[in-house]
Image: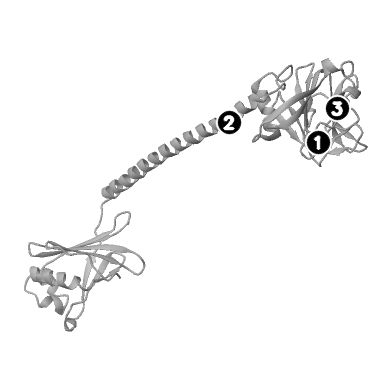
Amino acid sequence: MEDAPKPINNSSINVEIKENNDNAYNLTITNSFSVLKIYVEKENSFPKVDYYKEFKQEELAKTSKFFKVFEDINSVFMALKEIFESKKPILMEENEYINLKIVPIISALGESNLIIPRKKEDDKKIINDLCDVVNKQGKEIENLKGKIKTLEEKIDKLEKTMENNIVVRRLRNTDSLIGDIIKTNEQFNLICDWIDRDKNFKFKLLYKGTTDGDTKEIFHKKCDNQGPTISIIESTDGQIFGGYASKSWDKNSTTDIPDSNSFLFNINIRKKYSVLNNRGLMNGYICDFGGSNFHELWIYNNYFSNKGGCDNGTGYNFKNYELSGGKNYFEVKELEVYKVDEV
């Protein structure tokens, strides 16, 4: 219980009581037309729980020695007012009533217990109270939704601003990647995102099949030892696909070149195929991606009169020849290889 009661005014006695189980109650006692009215309200209860009873002097006198010494309700009221200024009553809640224990200042008068029954609320009032709570919560939810929507709009705006800034910076550094095969800013940014969406790149054209020739020798002469490269193939049936190598091509390498950061891709269906088992680059053909003697994307020598191929191996995660548009072998319309530099 708390030690100090609330201030008591001349028309009513108001006391807040807290039980050991943390239940809190508001006690109000008023003197009205020779009747002592006692009202107890349980805080934070729903449906509302409160207790109420009116006592005349004759009824109080029957309960204890303490109340017998007073001649009228006004005297009782003033005595209770004086008691509660120094000592709160003890309150015990039962199923359907409150036991209100009053300890007089004069101990010889003994304790007095008043039984305050619980007020019966009709169903209509309970429903109305429930509706009030639901309406209040509904307004709070709508207010919260409004705040969430505003926050989402701010986040969306910020993301678009950041994305636009990246796109602008990338477009300033397109160099020659947008050309005969990659024709749109969307395709260009898709490739950049696949390499690393948080970075910007510039591209230098190293090799172009229709200009430089379609032989393995020319490919390696132009593309070997250049660091990271992106190889882009356009087939005669309109598929645009290829591969990224973070390691250099090297025709003099006597073994496959592992490349855990390499990947294959298809622009038409906007899919990236990550490398598996740390496979990477081979030197058997042109733009030869694979490993362990298993080629998964390659172009034959003299490819304009020959072909290119892809296979469903275990080096990159694609199936059903999806990489090249569903064909095991394809005819090459153009091949471009770009050096990739971070800026």
Along the line of sight, which residue is nearer the eye, 22 or 217? 217
Which quadrant holds the N terminus?
bottom left
* Outermost bottom residue: 108
N-terminal of the two: label 1 or label 3?
1
Measured as percent of width and height from the top left, residue 259 is found at: 81, 38
Q: Residues within 10 Å of mark 1 (few under 14, many from 20)?
A: many
N-terminal of the two: label 1 or label 2?
2
Per the image, label 1 sits on a secondary structure element best described as: loop
Residue 174 lies left or right of residue 320; in this view the side is: left
Residue 25 lies left or right of residue 242; in this view the side is: left
Q: Which mark is residue 54?
A: none
Question: How is this picture coloured?
Answer: one colour
Residue 165 lies left or right of residue 258; in this view the side is: left
* Residue 122 vertical position relative to residue 273 in the rendered view, above or below: below
**Residue at the image position 41 percent from the left and 37 percent from the top:** 146
Give the mark toward the camera: 1 or 3.
Answer: 1
Along the line of sight, which residue is nearer the eye, 198 or 72? 198
List the residue tagged with mark 3: 298
Q: Residues within 10 Å of mark 2 (few under 14, many from 20)?
A: some
Give the Cα separation between the discs numbered 1 and 2: 28 Å
N-terminal of the two: label 3 or label 2?
2
Q: Amino acid at mark 2?
A: Glu
List the residue tagged with mark 1: 247
List the residue tagged with mark 2: 163
Give the mark toward the camera: 3 or 2.
Answer: 2
* Residue 41 vertical position relative to residue 281 in the rendered view, above or below: below
Give the Cα separation between the discs numbered 1 and 3: 17 Å
